[in-house]
Each structure stands twice: as C-alpha cells, then as structure tokens.
Image (cartoon, rainbow, N blue to C red):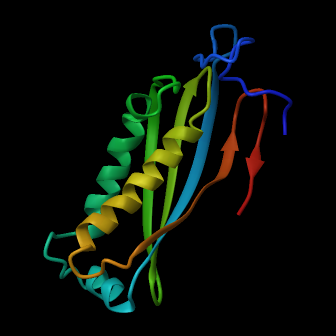
Amino acid sequence: MSGSFSHFDAAGNAVMVDVSEKPITARTATARARVRMQPETLAMIQAGTAKKGDVLGVARLAGIMAAKRTAELIPLCHPLPISAVEIALEPASPDAVEIIATVRTTAQTGVEMEALTAAAIAALTVYDMCKSVDRAMRVEDIRITHKSGGKSGTFTQE
C-alpha cells in the first residue's frame, strides 16, 4: 500500500488528481459482483419469466450505461473516453448471478471505477427487476479482479 492518498492536497482538501503529465496508455479493468437469491428466483431468470422482462439483458445494458456515466457519479473521477464495455451475467446454480464487467480505454488514468460502477449497477438492476418476488436478495463481493496499463502495471486477484 502506498504512503498517501492521491485525492487530498497538503491541507487535507479533496482534489481531483492532475493527470496532465501522465502518458496516454491502453488501460483495462475487470470487476466482479454477485447477486444471491432464492433458487426459484434464479430459475425464473433463466426461464425468462420475470414480470419485468429479460433480467440479464436489461442488467447488461444498465452496466454499460453506468460505465459511461461514472464520472457523473463519483465526485473526483475523471471523465474518460471509453473504448469498450463488456458485461457478462452468468447464472451460478443454485442461487446466484455472477457479473463480470470489463472496461477499456486509452487514456491518462485507469478505468477501475468504471468497471466497479458497471458491475454494481448491473447487480442492482438484477435486484430491481426481481425484488417483487425475492426481497431477500443480496448484492455481494463487488471487487476489482484485474487491472492493466499505466505506471502501476498489472494487478490480478480472484
């Protein structure tokens, strides 16, 4: 862990990090999330019988939209030219949907926040679309699993 937080100046004020001197490089980040639910809820999602429609398809679009709007949601996050957003929603029997969000850019700063936001919003969309039948669902384990590009190089965790 590094010695200081980059989003504070010497007086302790919150600041947006100045990235103007950083080189433009290709950057990628992948985040994951999980939505736990009753097995019957997962079966309903897989059968396509949710009252609100295609749960996984709508959640995929929500995740893509969220990645593109991250700088509007996270106060000190830089707006970035996003090159690609991939959202995979995978049923994980017997009781979960796994979400994998990968975001790419060529910029002066990374896309970890975009990937995390995409995974979180996709998970929240699954919850929203199924809450009428399963209020006990849980959004869990939102985390970065991979990041590459930039000065700090590659980071991977499961």
Q: Quadrant of the C terminus?
A: bottom right
In percent of the image, x 48 and y 25: which residue is there? 80
In percent of the image, x 53 and y 24: which residue is there? 76
Q: Is residue 93 above or below residue 157?
A: below
Question: How far across and how far down the image is residue 111, in percent?
Answer: 56, 36
Q: Residue 12: name its quadrant.
A: top right
Question: How far across and how far down the image is residue 69, in percent?
Answer: 37, 34
Of 34 and 74, the residue lying toward us: 74
Q: Is residue 114 left or right of residue 24?
A: left
Q: Is residue 28 above or below residue 135?
A: above
Q: Residue furthest top?
A: 21
Of 56 and 135, the residue lying toward us: 135
Q: Is residue 72 left or right of residue 155?
A: left
Q: Residue 47: name its quadrant.
A: bottom left
Q: Residue furthest left?
A: 51
Q: Residue furthest front?
A: 11
Of 60 and 121, the residue lying toward us: 121
Q: Is residue 51 left or right of residue 94?
A: left
Q: Is residue 150 above or below residue 103?
A: above
In percent of the image, x 46 and y 90: which residue is there? 94
Q: Quadrant of the N terminus?
A: top right
In percent of the image, x 32 and y 91: which residue is there? 40
Question: How far across and how far down the image is residue 10, in percent?
Answer: 75, 12
